[in-house]
Image (cartoon, grey):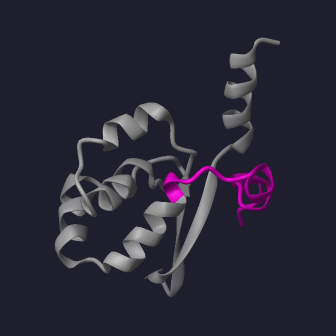
Amino acid sequence: MRAIDAVLAHRKSLGTLFLDVPEWLIDGKPMRIFYQSITLAERERLAQYDGPEVDAAILMLKAMDQQGQPLFDLNDMLQMKVAGDGGVISRVALVLASSPTLEQAAKNSLATAS
């Protein structure tokens, strides 16, 4: 096995993860955001954003529904910037942009989602 194969296999092993956001309710339940670990190419794309704007951009780029469709678009990102709770948006963005350990991924993966 080549070294790059181990790098790629690791990301694949993480699968699709999810995060429940208790502050954002849909039908009385916390919003469940699905996401995959962030790549260097995605980090590079996010470099165009300044300051706290990057948090909204992370949500736009990474947050998906269970079918893998984006939850937010550019208009949503702009609305988040002016009217969303910055603390919650920052907390969610931090999770979506962080690399989970294998143990975290095993506990919080699509395979275990209900």
Asked if residue 104 is among those painted magenta in the image, a careful observer would answer yes
**In this view, 37 is above or below 9:** below
**In this view, 92 is above or below 43:** below
| Quadrant holding the C terminus | bottom right
Q: Nearer the viewer, residue 71 or 92?
A: 92
Task: Residue at 56% x, 54% y: name it.
Answer: 98
- Residue 63 point in image, percent of width and height: 45, 55
**In this view, 89 is above or below 44:** below
Number of disc labels:
0
Q: Is residue 39 left or right of residue 58?
A: right
- Residue 78 point in image, percent of width and height: 18, 62
- Residue 99 point in image, percent of width and height: 61, 50
Residue 32 image-quadrant placement: bottom right
Task: Residue at 75% x, 24% y: name it.
Answer: 6
Task: Residue at 38% x, 57% y: name it.
Answer: 59
Q: Is residue 3 left or right of residue 86?
A: right
- Residue 43 point in image, percent of width and height: 41, 40
Q: Magenta part of the protein: which range?
A: 96-114
**In this view, 100 is above or below 6:** below
Q: Residue furthest front?
A: 51
Task: Residue at 70% x, 44% y: name it.
Answer: 14
Q: Nearer the viewer, residue 12 or 90?
A: 90
